[in-house]
Image (cartoon, grey):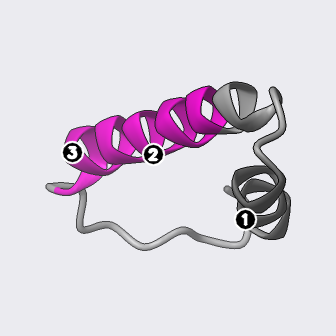
Amino acid sequence: MVPLLYSFITKDAALYAYDKAIFITVISGLAMTLVSRKRSRELQVRD
């Protein structure tokens, strides 16, 4: 988040790259959470 804040303050062109990266990360995490939220089995040592 620090690079995003610094880029926003200095009006750096990399701001859009950080925006895209954060958006992709959040969407990916949300998708994985929604797919696996009904799994109730805990991981075992062999997993």
Numbered badge on residue 34: 3
* Dot 2: element: helix
Q: Which residue is mark 1?
A: 5
Q: CA distance from mark 3 to mark 2?
A: 12 Å
Question: Closer to the N terminus: mark 3 or mark 2?
Answer: 2
Q: CA distance from mark 2 to mark 1?
A: 17 Å
Q: Main secondary structure of the magenta part?
A: helix
Question: Closer to the N terminus: mark 1 or mark 3?
Answer: 1
Residue 15, position as x, y percentages in the image: 72, 37
Q: Which residue is mark 2?
A: 26
Q: Is residue 39 magenta?
A: no
Q: CA distance from mark 1 to mark 3?
A: 29 Å
Residue 29, position as x, y percentages in the image: 45, 46
Of tags 2 and 1, the one toward the viewer is 1
The part of the chain drawn in magenta is: 19-37
Of tags 3 and 2, the one toward the viewer is 2
Query: Which residue: 21% across, 45% down?
Result: 34
**Which residue type carries mark 1?**
Leu
Using a 10 Å C-alpha cutoff, classify the residue at mark 3 as few (fewer than 14 neighbours), some (14 to 19) or many (20 or more).
few
